[in-house]
Image (cartoon, rainbow, N blue to C red):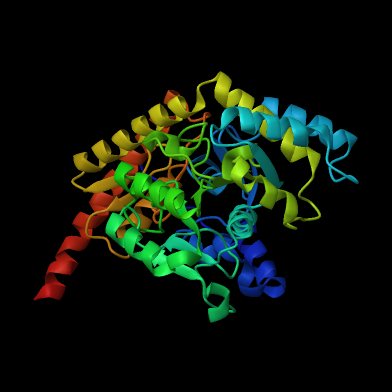
Amino acid sequence: MTATPPDLSNSLDTRLRGRAAQVIPGGMWGHMRAAAVPTGYPQFFSGGEGARVRDVDGRDYIDFMCSWGPIILGHRHPEVEAVARAQLDLGDCLDGPTEHAVRLAEALVETIPHADWALFQKNGSDAMTTCVTLARAGTGKRKVLVAKGAYHGAVPWCSPSVLGVTAEDRAHLIYYIYNDVESLDAAVAEAGDDLAAIVASAFKHDLATHQQLPEEAFALAARAHCDRTGAALVLDDVRAGFRLNLGGSWETVGVRPDLAGYSKAIANGYPLSAVTGNDRFRAAAEQVFVTGSFWYSGAPMAAAVKVLEILARDDGPARLRAAGERFCTGVTDSAARHRFEVTMSGPPAIPLMQFADDPEAKLGEAFCQQALARGVYLHNKHNMFLSLAHTDGVIDTALSAIDDAFAALARSRSADAPARARSRT
């Protein structure tokens, strides 16, 4: 099977990029900036269905990014769309919340063991900033511990970019190394009597870095420090929440946080995030002022209630894990057949693909381009995501195309070998 990357030279995608460059700084912003996706990838899309997305030029792809995580059931899941549409037909942004706010809070409290209450926002940045605010309000202290390289949002206190950020924005952050108990102990000691919170991701998912699941000893140490000092243990479950365990991702290591932030998959693509907490921080949650004009919209909350119902009914985390294992095993086996060494780190449902001896992910980018040409949308530096729409049949179709992509990459490597040999002499 032969395939060539899509010709974007005169495509609608290219024309839209040109128009965007005139009216949007840099042509795009944040993680959707064209430079953040592999070269040759489309920037603009027109729709999605199940496990597939379609770009504005009409090309379909099996989607292993799931809108960078929000799609957990599949694009346009009919049950979710029905309840969201029913509320949209009545009104979405009203003078106050709909009944769905109460129903969703009740569902989260019933589903998540540590949760006694829930608050709702729009984005992961909102949720994690709310968690930190509540931790400081509830403890009366200032210092917040975060892992080096961790991503908790795109606002000054935690943004990966320092442009426009002042030292004062991060004056009370102390850094530790994820899964390193000694490093965590040292950070706690540095905070002294002013420790408000230890913030930890569900797993170590730094960009383009081998992913690490939480080690039980590390999670238990974080819990013990918070119990001893009165600080809040804050779990950033924005990326992994509901994919690994409906009760919270650290249920897998037997540790429960005081506060947790959720977003991504909570409403299968509808804009929503949530903070859950225990009763120790209820008073703080009652007193602090965190809000937004669109934080009370009804349709996303109706969608989220249905998402939780479906994930529980259909044993979502187990199905996602099985799908992820099938996908990851297929990719690594295919790579080995064509004499490439590829690792798939992180949870199977949220894997990161990396080639050995590829520090700048150039080989990964070339492979992703080959896969894209065969109708499979992957990423060479960021976690990928699976959904319940990634059935065995869908995955097997993707793996067949992926095998062809590895074969093409191997042919390209062989063709380039003489030139590389000459360059060394």
Q: Residue 10, image x and y in percent?
A: 60, 61
Q: Residue 407, image x and y in percent?
A: 27, 44
**Is 294 located above or below residue 361 in the figure?**
above
Dividing the picture into quadrants, the one containing residue 2 is: top left
- Say whether residue 9 is visible: no
Dividing the picture into quadrants, the one containing residue 314 is: top right
Dividing the picture into quadrants, the one containing residue 326 is: top left
Foreground residue among 174 and 12: 174
- Residue occupying the far top of the picture: 313
The residue located at (21%, 48%) in the rendering is 341
The residue located at (39%, 54%) in the rendering is 380
The residue located at (39%, 35%) in the rendering is 254
Task: Describe residue 367's horizontal placement relative to residue 317 as left or right.
Answer: left
Quarter of the picture containing the C terminus is: bottom left
Foreground residue among 72 and 421: 72
Quarter of the picture containing the N terminus is: top left
- Say whether residue 355 is visible: yes
Q: Residue 127, image x and y in percent?
A: 62, 52
The residue located at (62%, 48%) in the rendering is 281
Q: Residue 303, image x and y in percent?
A: 70, 33
Q: How many numbered dots are placed on residues in this image?
A: 0
